[in-house]
Image (cartoon, helix red, strand yellow):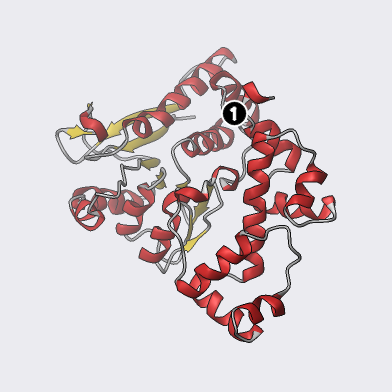
């Protein structure tokens, strides 16, 4: 079988680690297949650009080749800092957008890493499709590309030949999926173990740090959020909450939903899970004790809600995210 042709589209300001991360993991997979007796490499990888020279984020020079036909085109992300003029940055990547469109038209599978999804969306490939990106910029992406069905919790989303991934290390989740499909699950599993990469992740939800997210909502909903945050252990009582803010229950749901994009109960459940995550990471308290602290008398109910939000049961979450020195 001919090697799979994989091209990484380097562009000005891209993260160098996201240029080389997938190729390096594919190199490891090639070593695994060679050890198993494969006579030739499984992948033919090249870093390409329509430009003669590319400087990655931080000024690191990236050696590139001319764009060539590929089976898979990978689009790395870039530094989306608060000071970056995103409109200007994307406008300056017209050559890269043209490459993305032409490669897709020729039948290549297009893959974005992290906020590379912004560039793929600007190229017109994500309209009407499902996609994901870094949780840190998911809200900004959703507001900019309203025709994309964003799955903000997902690590890897493929829709119609276009794949998007979550932040940085999700490129390894994609690479392992590619190895699994091309070389089989045994090779993918061995590659993951060699690289010390988790090959069983399914969501980026456990990694979300809401302290880094911008506050969503206006005066009314932010006031309700503060009230709920300060009383996480109280029983949820929508009529009482509405009376406190001098509105009807219908008005409470409408105004809060319009401003915050969710119901007060959904926000409260998320806030309780965030508090529980912190307690699981920093204390030895039992799951039942933590459940009671955040308003759940039944630990089973709490465990189900926690798992639905994070993709992990409370005990699994503690094992994965509590610092080793604190265990």
| Residue 276 in the image: above or below residue 197 | below
Question: Who is closer to the viewer here, 101 or 105?
Answer: 101
Characterize the local packing of mark 1: few (<14), some (14-19) or many (20 or more) Cα atoms within 10 angstroms. Answer: many
Q: Is residue 315 left or right of residue 210?
A: right
Q: Secondary structure at mark 1?
A: helix
Which residue: 59% across, 34% down? Answer: 180
Query: Is residue 254 visible in the rendered structure shown here?
Result: yes
Question: Who is closer to the viewer here, 258 or 297?
Answer: 297
Question: Who is closer to the viewer here, 289 or 84?
Answer: 289
Picture coordinates of residue 52 (x, y %)? Answer: 14, 34
Which residue: 45% across, 42% down? Answer: 167
Picture coordinates of residue 326 (x, y %)? Answer: 65, 25
Q: Is residue 61 left or right of residue 124?
A: left
**Residue 257 sits in quarter:** bottom right
Question: Who is closer to the viewer here, 165 or 27?
Answer: 165
Picture coordinates of residue 147 (x, y %)? Answer: 42, 69
Picture coordinates of residue 165 (x, y %)? Answer: 47, 46
Can you say which quadrant of the picture contains the C terminus?
top right
Q: Which residue is mark 1?
A: 188
| Residue 292 in the image: above or below residue 244 | above
Which residue: 36% across, 30% down? Answer: 17
């Amino acid at each position: 079988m001919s090697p799979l042709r994989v091209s990484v589209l380097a562009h000005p300001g891209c993260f160098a680690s996201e240029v080389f991360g997938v190729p390096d993991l594919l190199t490891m997979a090639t070593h695994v297949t060679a050890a198993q007796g494969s006579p030739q490499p499984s992948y033919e990888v090249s870093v390409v650009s329509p430009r003669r020279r590319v400087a990655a984020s931080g000024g690191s020079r990236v050696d590139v080749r001319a764009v060539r036909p590929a089976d898979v085109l990978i689009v790395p992300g870039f530094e989306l800092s608060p000071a970056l003029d995103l409109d200007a940055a994307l406008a300056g990547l017209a050559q890269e957008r043209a490459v993305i469109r032409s490669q897709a038209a020729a039948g290549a599978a297009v893959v974005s890493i992290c906020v590379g999804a912004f560039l793929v969306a600007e190229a017109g490939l994500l309209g009407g499709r499902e996609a994901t990106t870094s949780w840190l910029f998911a809200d900004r992406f959703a507001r900019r590309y309203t025709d994309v069905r964003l799955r903000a919790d997902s690590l890897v989303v493929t829709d119609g030949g276009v794949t998007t991934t979550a932040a940085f290390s999700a490129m390894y989740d994609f690479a392992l999926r590619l190895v699994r499909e091309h070389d089989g699950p045994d090779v993918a599993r061995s590659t993951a173990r060699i690289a010390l990469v988790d090959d069983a992740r399914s969501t980026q939800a456990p990694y979300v740090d809401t302290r880094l997210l911008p506050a969503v909502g206006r005066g009314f909903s932010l006031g309700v959020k503060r009230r709920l945050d300060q009383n996480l252990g109280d029983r949820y009582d929508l009529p009482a909450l509405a009376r406190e803010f001098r509105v009807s229950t219908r008005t409470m749901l409408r105004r809060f939903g319009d401003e915050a994009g969710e119901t007060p109960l959904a926000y409260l459940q998320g806030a309780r899970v965030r508090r529980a995550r912190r307690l699981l990471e920093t204390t030895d308290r039992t799951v039942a004790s933590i459940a009671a602290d955040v308003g759940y008398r039944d630990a089973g109910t709490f465990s189900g809600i926690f798992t639905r939000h994070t993709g992990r049961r409370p005990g699994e979450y503690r094992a994965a995210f509590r610092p080793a020195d604190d265990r």
